[in-house]
Amino acid sequence: QVQLVESGGGLVQAGGSLRLSCAASGRTFSAMGWFRQAPGKERAFVAAIKWSAGSTVYADSVKGRFTISRDNAKNTVYLQINNLKPEDTAHYYCAATVSYYGGTCFYTRDDAYGYWGQGTQVTVSS
């Protein structure tokens, strides 16, 4: 049974940092990603990483502040978030796929993923 379990969210002041974790089990994935959904908004892509090559792709809005990485041995993907802003407040979801796509750009689409975690809340106070 596939499980994606996120952790690391919380309440933090603007300018602070958080590291989100997503522990995966049950299958070997080709890529994993992070998405977020703010109140009243649609779920949006944040970052993704190809599992074997380690190549990454980011949403323009988070480039330079967010870093996605993976630990193969722990089957875990991380999202390091620095210089948090109030607009980063959202529920952050981990997603995984077993499909292979030609370019990293395909992993920005939520329909590229077949597995989703329950999410972890990040709240940034100003």
Image: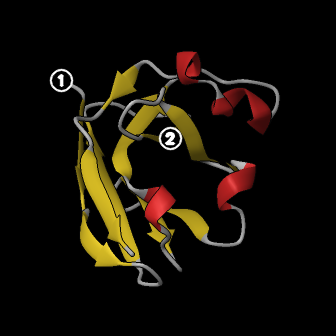
99 relative to 97 in the view: left or right: right
Q: Residue at x 49, y 57 (%)?
A: 87
Indicate the position of residue 27 as horizontal and vertical percent values.
Answer: 34, 30
Relative to 102, say whether 80 is above or below.
below
Q: Which mark is residue 1?
A: 1
Residue in the foreground of this view, choosing between 82 and 28: 82
Q: Identify the element where label 2 is drawn.
A: strand
Q: Nearer the viewer, mark 2 or mark 1?
A: 2
Residue furthest bottom as drawn: 15
Q: Identify the element where label 1 is drawn.
A: loop
Which three-letter amino acid code belongs to the residue tagged 2?
Met
Q: Are marks 2 and 1 in contact (CB under 8 Å)?
A: no
Which three-letter amino acid code belongs to the residue tagged 1?
Gln
Residue furthest right as drawn: 103
Q: Quadrant of the N terminus?
A: top left
Identify the coloring. Answer: secondary structure
46 relative to 25 in the view: left or right: right
Indicate the position of residue 35 as horizontal and vertical percent values.
Answer: 48, 40
Q: Residue at x 33, y 28 (%)?
A: 116
Q: Residues within 10 Å of mark 1 (few under 14, many from 20)?
A: few
Q: Residue at x 58, y 66 (%)?
A: 66
Q: Which residue lies under the disc numbered 2?
A: 32
Q: Residues within 10 Å of mark 2 (few under 14, many from 20)?
A: many
